[in-house]
Amino acid sequence: MDFGRLSRNQISARQPLLWGALAFSAGLWAGKYIWRPPSWWVIAALVFLRCRSLFPEKKGSGFVHSGAEHNFCDGRAYDSGPSASPQPESFGNGNEVVLTVHVIAEGNIQSDGMGSFHQRIDIETEKIEAEGRATDAHIGVRLSIYSQARPADAHSAAISPMQLLRYGQRIRFAATLNAPRNFRHPGAFDYAGYLRDHGIEVTASTKYAGIELLPGFAGSRVELWRARVHRSVIQKIHALWPERVAGLMDAIVIGEESFIDRPTRVDFQRSGTYHVLVVSGMNVSILAMFTLWTLRRLGVGDIAASVCAIALILAYAALTNVGPPVWRAALMFAVYLATRLLYRDRAMLNALGAAALAMLIVDPNALYGASFQMTFLCIVLVAGIGIPLLERTIEP
């Protein structure tokens, strides 16, 4: 069918998932930026009911309810307005507090030279002891841990006295909670917003010698398995390649950038090739196509090969834990393979809508992330404007 001869209604009918994702996004946006106190909605509802009783309804009219209206009315779930939980800045008032926490994101031990090491992890508080009283609170904290070795000779200076803290471990230490700050010049990176998107509200630092390991495990068993597999891949890479090359391979294969030093990072940025070090849809496409080609060469049927490819790319997206770019590509490829088995026509915008809708249902806050917005905007420009323009100009 010629795209240029389709009517607007026909085109809209072919992209129901895209329009559903747009309506859902509009509801999330309205719920966040047009939130009002509940008392306002009660007053507005009473005024509406009063007006409804004064003005008779016209025949044939009615209300159209959408997902956007539902999210608008329930917008408080995604608002950063009043909260009953205590604010992080209120603990200690800038003084040192004692934290009982568990690890929610692992880091890597890195050397600072001269027998100095550090690791950066994300933790969630269980109890905060400040000013002689203990408070149960669940706050995300980005913790920097430092250790200074005192070697007897130069050889032992390269051996870290610090142990890597694993996901789910419970620890106790004293530190000062600090709210993240941004540089105030135009164009500066929104570090505070970046941390908030990852559930981190405050930062802290402590010495490794002052950390007390506690018994027990806190967290998800599924995330524990993912963290172990992720750590195993890093160890295998560092066993196969030299340290400098291994850092690049970590970033290319699973998106781990902590082993890339600043000069190398700057060199890639200046050369315009930094995207090579970022796991994106290209990695997912290469993995999926290679899997399909290999299985088909081995004589595996279309259904079994597609199921194996979908399972593999979803597992890879979960392993990297990079975010919207990888999940977008994985979900779109999964939709493509599923519809291919049902002998349905390919519709890139429909696959885009399905991927966006799934991601927003799982994590509504992804809508406000720059990665999500840029990823889906680029695909909409290509699939919604570029491809139709080519079909109506050059291709005929």
Image: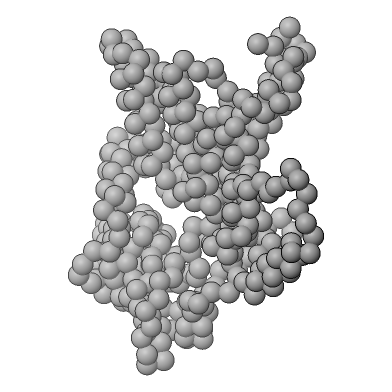
Q: Position of residue 82 (x, y in %)?
A: 58, 74
Q: Position of residue 238 (x, y in %)?
A: 32, 41
Identify the residue at horizontal 62%, vertical 32% (top origin): 379
Identify the residue at horizontal 74%, vertical 43% (top origin): 60
Residue occupying the far bottom of the picture: 132
Number of marks: 0
Quadrant where the image shows the N terminus? top right
Residue occupying the far top of the picture: 396
Identify the residue at horizontal 30%, vertical 20% (top origin): 304
Q: Is residue 387 left or right of residue 218?
A: right
Q: Nearer the viewer, residue 8 or 28?
A: 8
Quadrant where the image shows the C terminus? top right
Q: Position of residue 225 (x, y in %)?
A: 27, 48
Q: Nearer the viewer, residue 288 or 59?
A: 59
**In terms of image quadrants, where is residue 287?**
top left
Q: Nearer the viewer, residue 82 or 129?
A: 82
Q: Is residue 340 left or right of residue 182?
A: left
Q: Is residue 278 visible?
A: no
Is residue 181 depicted above or below 387 in this figure? Answer: below
Is residue 383 depicted above or below 27 in this figure? Answer: above
Q: Is residue 306 left or right of residue 52?
A: left
- Give the image's coloring scheme: one colour
**In terms of image quadrants, where is residue 248?**
top left
Q: Position of residue 5 (x, y in %)?
A: 74, 14
Q: Nearer the viewer, residue 24 or 183?
A: 24
Q: Is residue 363 visible?
A: yes
Is residue 119 depicted above or below 236 in this figure? Answer: below
Residue occupying the far left of the picture: 215
Identify the residue at horizontal 69%, vertical 11% (top origin): 2
**In terms of image quadrants, where is residue 38?**
bottom right
Q: Is residue 189 left or right of residue 245?
A: right
